[in-house]
């Protein structure tokens, strides 16, 4: 599979394949699968075409005419094609210049496109076309390949056939036992059949087998990655009866939910082992992850070691430190007046501390005086010295990749245990792939006493006057003693970035934005720095308004957050800096402006900031997106469910899957062509089990060079080497 294409294909073809499609080896070429197939049994006759249908037909080019376009620059190619039964049809191509070299009289090709009418005659406008050669004519299916302007599908098909004809079947990397149990075709046969299927069943069987290759490649890589991390030695911290954790549990003002108990037990068992824990806890916003993390940290402190909690921003770090201290009470005030005997200390260590405070914090981490150190992710990257770091808790994983996790684990003799927490629910297949090197625990229930959040879409396109109702609602919430967030997609103040003020919607005059139908798409997203002053002088006059965004200096952010927490502000106009972790139980309302500019998961996270206390929360999604647009569908989905797992699945469907799987592979061309997180859940789950067994039995894959190669094809040779050479 690694042999070069020359001399199996011609020199010119080999050069084009390499330059245009990065196809260098036999393996690259035979894994360049058809994009689709044309079933010759399902071709349409020209005589039977109907307006509006999507038709695929085989015909011969009879006549071509190149003309100038009237309204635009460029040339139009008008083509008359004739099918086997003698009927003719007009086709028009807009890029006449380019296609005239391929489409000339006598050429037979597959044409496909939507049937329209022009000058009272049926025609195909700018159809897709694939020229045919003689070999194609006798096959039941025509394979259509991803191609470029310089090398077309037909030429690729010819190269593939040449290679398949000359090549012996490759050695099959999948163990025969696995193939047999899963009823999988042999690799050689599958490769031939995916390129040249004889029947639909053929093609399905071939594809199923090749999907398995990719699933096994991914799962073996992950199994190796898991092995590389968990085989390192770590300090065991078994629960200590009568210790800090026990004292904490005894003083806890609420009872843990069943989920918190179960996940807590899994973590407690992990921490007791002599190999590092490597666990992801996912639970919706408000599910109570902080308590879980704190209990894990206390078990480690009981074991005589330190714990670090890392948050994505300084605001959140500061807030975490405060809420940990509150939860701990006297148990967190070691050395202070009123501290309990066995107390530990929580130290906040961030870049914005004054020099003196920072020096003290560093000292506390280094001496071990601080049992718990809270900071941003920079904490570890800055090589802060710990006396004995036993556990790293990372909050809000979704901003965090594999490399960062590796960096956190450090290079010391003993690896710290690692607990990752995310509020973004993760669909099962994503958990098994992107996070597949971690053990995953889920908190599916929320603690009792949480209030429901009512989410409503405010569609300015049809109901421009509703914006006034939005501001009235804000006034009502404040009058009732509550507080409100107003979220904008942008900070603003970035002059010269092409966002003239004139383009902004006037918030007091809803008509202005709603009228500009296509202008709305080009308007820059609303910005905190522009919205806040307008509201202050206009619709929300008289309320105490604060602003919060990422460009504020850290201490100012902290000041604003504290003022809001203490109820000294009624309204906080903010960017998504409030997306994660911010916890103000008295905030009951959230208005998200330009809501269509946010992702599904992001919106779900944002609204989780309200209804954290006993009063019901309301979230208003303000949008100018027109009715029946995809943007509106997404917003309706958010309004329709509060089930984060359901939304996560929707998000996956809406996002390009490749982006998700791409996280497995740092920047290289994807080795994954067929595997789908939506369609192949069962295969992925089974492959995970096979891979774990194989790696347990043969950790270096020494007896299985084919599988080792498969790992390389999937995640790149560099990463493969990183796992396999360590063993
Ligand atoms: P998350 O980090 O998962 O979004 P938090 O840990 O911040 O959620 O918990 C949200 C709120 O619920 C906090 O005020 C916390 O003290 C409280 N809480 C956590 N667990 C429980 C429980 N079992 N019963 C009642 N309240 C709880
Ligand atoms: Mg949290």
Image (tube, rainbow, N blue to C red):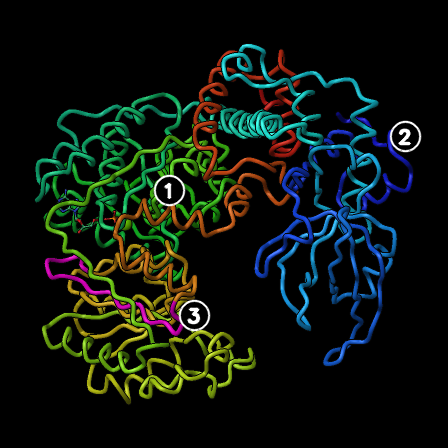
Task: Identify the mark nearer the N-term, 2 or 1.
Answer: 2
Seen at 29% across and 84% down, the residue is: 535
142, above or below 572, in the image: above
In percent of width and height, residue 385 lies at: 42, 42
What element does badge 3 sit on? loop
Mark 2 or mark 3, which is nearer to you?
Answer: 2
526, above or below 290, in the image: below
Measure the alpha-carbon separation of dots 2 and 3. Answer: 59 Å
Q: Which residue is mark 1?
A: 426
**Residue 122 picture quarter:** bottom right
In this view, the residue in front, 502 or 100, is 100
Seen at 14% across and 70% down, the residue is: 482
**Residue 155 picture quarter:** top right
Label 2 crowd bin: few (<14), some (14–19), many (20+), radius 10 Å: few
Image quarter in which the C terminus is found? top right
Q: Which residues are magenta?
A: 611-627
In percent of width and height, residue 180 lies at: 54, 12
Q: Look at the numbered discs 3 and 1 and tell me whether their residues touch, using CB distance below 8 Å.
A: no
Task: Identify the mark nearer the N-term, 2 or 3.
Answer: 2
Mark 3 or mark 1, which is nearer to you?
Answer: 1
Q: Look at the numbered discs 2 and 1 and tell me whether their residues touch, using CB distance below 8 Å.
A: no
Q: Which residue is mark 2?
A: 7
Task: Identify the mark nearer the N-term, 3 or 1.
Answer: 1
Circle number at residue 551: 3
In this view, the residue in front, 151 or 90, is 90
Circle number at residue 104: none
Q: Is residue 527 magenta?
A: no
Image quarter in which the N terminus is found? top right
Measure the alpha-carbon separation of dots 2 and 1. Answer: 47 Å
């Amino acid at each position: 599979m690694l042999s070069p294409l020359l001399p199996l294909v011609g020199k010119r073809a080999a050069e084009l394949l390499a330059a245009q499609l990065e196809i260098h080896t036999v393996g690259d070429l035979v894994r360049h699968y058809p994009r689709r197939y044309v079933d010759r049994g399902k071709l349409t006759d020209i005589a039977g075409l109907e307006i509006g249908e999507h038709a695929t037909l085989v015909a011969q080019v009879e006549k071509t005419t190149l003309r100038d376009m009237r309204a635009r620059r460029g040339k139009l190619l008008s083509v008359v094609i004739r099918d086997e039964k003698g009927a003719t049809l007009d086709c028009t191509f807009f890029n006449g210049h380019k296609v005239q070299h391929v489409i000339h009289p006598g050429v037979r090709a597959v044409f496909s496109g939507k049937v329209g009418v022009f000058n009272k005659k049926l025609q195909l406008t700018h159809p897709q076309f694939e020229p045919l050669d003689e070999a194609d004519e006798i096959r039941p299916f025509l394979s259509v390949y991803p191609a470029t302007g310089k090398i077309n599908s037909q030429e690729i098909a010819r190269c593939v056939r040449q290679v398949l004809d000359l090549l012996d079947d490759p050695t099959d990397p999948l163990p025969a036992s696995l193939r047999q149990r899963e009823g999988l075709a042999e690799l050689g046969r599958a490769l031939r059949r995916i390129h040249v299927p004889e029947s639909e069943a053929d093609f399905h069987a071939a594809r199923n087998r090749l999907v398995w290759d990719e699933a096994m490649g991914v799962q073996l890589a992950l199994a190796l990655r898991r092995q590389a991390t968990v085989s390192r030695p770590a300090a065991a911290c078994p629960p200590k009866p009568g210790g800090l954790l026990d004292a904490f549990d005894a003083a806890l003002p609420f009872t843990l939910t069943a989920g918190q108990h179960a996940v807590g037990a899994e973590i407690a068992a992990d921490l007791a082992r002599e190999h590092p824990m490597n666990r992801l806890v996912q639970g919706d916003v408000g599910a109570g992850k902080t308590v879980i993390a704190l209990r894990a940290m206390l078990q480690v402190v009981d074991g005589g070691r330190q714990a670090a909690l890392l948050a994505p921003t300084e605001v959140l770090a500061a807030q975490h430190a405060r809420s940990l201290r509150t939860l701990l009470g006297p148990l967190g005030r070691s050395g202070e007046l009123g501290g309990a005997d066995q107390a530990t200390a929580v130290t906040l260590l961030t870049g914005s501390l004054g020099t003196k405070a920072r020096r003290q914090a560093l000292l506390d981490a280094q001496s071990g005086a601080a049992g718990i150190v809270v900071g941003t992710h920079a904490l570890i990257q800055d090589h802060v010295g710990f006396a004995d770091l036993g556990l790293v808790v990372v909050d809000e994983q979704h901003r965090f990749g594999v490399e960062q996790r590796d960096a956190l684990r450090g290079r010391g003799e003993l690896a710290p245990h690692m607990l990752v927490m995310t509020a973004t629910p993760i669909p099962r297949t994503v958990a098994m792939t992107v996070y597949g090197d971690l053990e995953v625990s889920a908190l599916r229930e929320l603690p009792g006493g949480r209030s429901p959040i009512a989410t409503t879409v405010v569609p300015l396109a049809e109901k421009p006057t509703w914006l006034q109702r939005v501001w009235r609602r804000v006034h009502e919430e404040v009058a009732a003693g509550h507080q409100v967030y107003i979220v904008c997609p942008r900070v603003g103040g970035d002059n010269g970035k092409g966002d003239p003020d004139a383009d902004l919607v006037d918030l007091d005059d809803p008509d202005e934005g709603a009228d500009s139908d296509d202008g709305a798409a080009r308007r820059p997203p609303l910005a905190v720095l522009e919205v806040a002053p307008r509201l202050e002088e206009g619709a929300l006059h008289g309320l105490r308004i604060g602003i919060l965004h990422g460009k504020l200096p850290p201490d100012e952010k902290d000041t604003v957050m504290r003022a809001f927490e203490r109820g000294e502000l009624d309204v906080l106009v903010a960017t998504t800096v409030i997306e994660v972790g911010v916890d103000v139980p008295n905030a009951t309302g959230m208005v998200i402006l330009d809501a269509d500019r946010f992702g599904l998961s992001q919106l779900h996270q944002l609204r989780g900031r309200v209804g954290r206390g006993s009063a019901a929360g309301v979230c208003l999604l303000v949008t100018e997106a027109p009715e029946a647009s995809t943007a509106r569908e997404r917003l309706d989905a958010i309004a329709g469910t509060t089930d984060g797992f359901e939304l996560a699945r929707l998000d996956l469907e809406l996002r390009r899957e490749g982006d998700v799987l791409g996280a497995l592979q740092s920047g290289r061309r994807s080795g994954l062509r067929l595997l789908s997180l939506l369609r192949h859940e069962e295969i992925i789950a089974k492959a995970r089990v096979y891979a774990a067994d194989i790696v347990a039995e043969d950790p270096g894959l020494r007896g299985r060079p084919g599988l080792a190669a498969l790992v390389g094809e999937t995640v790149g040779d560099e990463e493969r080497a990183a796992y396999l050479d360590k063993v």
